[in-house]
Amino acid sequence: MTKTIVAPSILSLDYANVSEQLKQLNESKAEWMHFDVMDGHFVPNLTFGPDLLKGFKKCTDMVMDVHIMVEDPAFFSDVFLKAGADILTFHYEACKDEKEVRMICEEIHAWHAKAGVSVKPGTPISVLDPLLDVIDVVLIMSVEPGFGGQSFMEDMLEKVRYIKKQIVEQNRSTLIEIDGGINADTAKLAKAAGVDVLVAGSYVFRNDIKTAVESLL
Ligand code: DX5
Ligand code: ZN
C-alpha cells in the first residue's frame, strides 16, 4: 500500500490558541497544511487571504496545500501562488470550460507548483478523465464545500475508485485527495478506496492533534 499523507485543515484551528496548536501540528506526522480559501460567492463563507498564508509559511515547513473555493480561480490562483502555495487546488465548477481548467493548471506549473482540481459532490468525476495529464492532485469533496464539521458522504468513495482506475490506466502519478468529514473511521474507508491524501479539520483540531493525525495514518 502506498503512503498516506495527512493534511490538517486550518479552517478548524482554534484561533484563540494559534501558537500552541501550530506547535503541536509541527510536532505531528502531518506533512501538508490544508488552507481553505473561500470568497463568499462560490461558497457561502469567507476565510483567509494571501497575507495569512505568508504568515503560516513562516511558522512551518509543511507543504502548503491551498484549496481555493472562489468564483475567479484564474485570478486567485496567481494571488496565492505568489504568497507561497506549494499546491494550488481550484474548482472545476468555477471554470467556463475544460480549456480554462487546462490553462489554469499550466499557469500553476509555470510557478513550479502542483496543480489540483476539485469536484463538488454533485459533479461527475469523469469530467477529469481528459485532464489527468495536467492534474497533479484530484481533490474529491466528500461534503458540500463551505464549512467544516459536516458528515462524510460515503457515496463519494465511488468517485475515488473510478478516478484511481483512470490514473492507473493512463499511467499517471496523480494523487487522490479527499476533503470533508474525515475521522479515524472514514479515513479507513477512504484509504481502502485508493485515497492518498486525507484532509481533516474538525477531527484533528477538536482532539489531541498528534494522536488524531496518527490515527489517520
Ligand atoms: C470545506 C473545506 C474543508 C474543511 C473540512 O469546504 O474544504 O477543508 O475544513 O473540515 P472537516 O474535516 O471538519 O469536515
Ligand atoms: Zn478544503
Image (cartoon, rainbow, N blue to C red):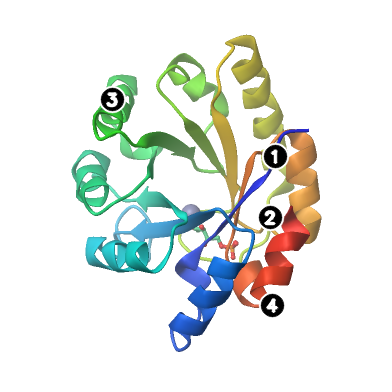
Number of marks: 4
Crowding near the residue tagged with mark 2, few <14, some 14–19, many ≥20 C-alpha atoms within 10 Å: some
The CA distance from mark 3 to mark 1 is: 27 Å
Vertical arrangement, residue 91 with respect to residue 186, above or below: above
Residue 145 visible to an observer of this rendering: no
Looking at the rendered structure, the kind of residue marked 2 is Phe
Q: State the residue at coordinates (79%, 45%).
A: 189
Q: Where in the figure is residue 206, as x and y percent of width and height?
A: 64, 78
Considering only order in the chain, which callout, 1 or 4, is on the residue closer to the N terminus?
Answer: 1
Looking at the rendered structure, the kind of residue marked 3 is Glu
Looking at the rendered structure, the kind of residue marked 4 is Asp
The CA distance from mark 2 to mark 1 is: 22 Å
Q: Quadrant of ligand 1?
A: bottom right
Marking on residue 106: 3
Q: In terms of secondary structure, where does tag 3 sit?
A: helix
Q: Where in the figure is residue 21, as x and y percent of width and height?
A: 53, 78
Residue nearest the observer in this picture, 110 or 167:
110
**Residue beneath label 4, please?**
208
Looking at the rendered structure, the kind of residue marked 1 is Lys
The CA distance from mark 4 to mark 1 is: 22 Å
